[in-house]
Amino acid sequence: QVQLVESGGGLVQPGGSLRLSCTASGSMFSIGGMGWYRQAPGKERELVATMPSDGSTNYSDSMKGRFTISRDNAKKTVYLQMNSLKPEDTAVYYCTMGIRRYEMSSWVSYWGKGTLVTVSS
């Protein structure tokens, strides 16, 4: 069974920084794209950043210049460095990975359970 587990969330003051991590575990053949989404209270889940297997990156406009996504394939981990945090960044942050469990299987998107980030003074 594949599992994604996020860590690194918490309470931070406006202007502060946090680094989120998400690690995949379980039996798998390969990992493709990785990404982060977030869901604020009362709002729909939205894209934060994605990183396909070729290392390119894609960010939501409101996060460009403040957030940085990176990955360590050997560790099966994706990171999200968040700087200059604002109260409106408060949300549950979810990671996602496209994973093939076996060589001939299809790609399946897996999701973590989320980690809460609260930006408040």
Image (cartoon, rainbow, N blue to C red):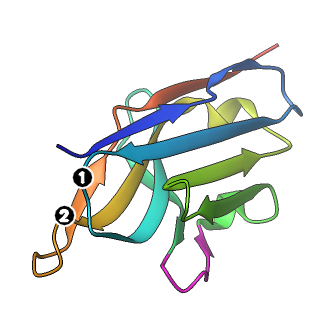
The image's mark for residue 27 is 1
Q: Residue at x 72, y 39 (%)?
A: 19
Tell me the element at label 1: loop
Compared to residue 6, the image places residue 11 above or below, namely above
**Is residue 66 shown left or right of residue 56?**
right
State the quadrant of the N terminus. top left
Residue 97 in the magenta stretch? The answer is no
Image spot of residue 87 (x, y percent): 71, 29
Compared to residue 109, the image places residue 24 above or below, namely above
Who is closer to the viewer here, 98 or 74?
74
Q: Residue at x 56, y 54 (%)?
A: 78
Compared to residue 64, the image places residue 118 above or below, namely above
Amino acid type of disc 2? Answer: Arg
Who is closer to the viewer here, 86 or 57?
57
Image spot of residue 116 (x, y percent): 53, 24
Q: Which residue is mark 2?
A: 101
Amino acid type of disc 1? Answer: Ser
User: What main secondary structure does the magenta stretch of the protein show?
Assistant: loop
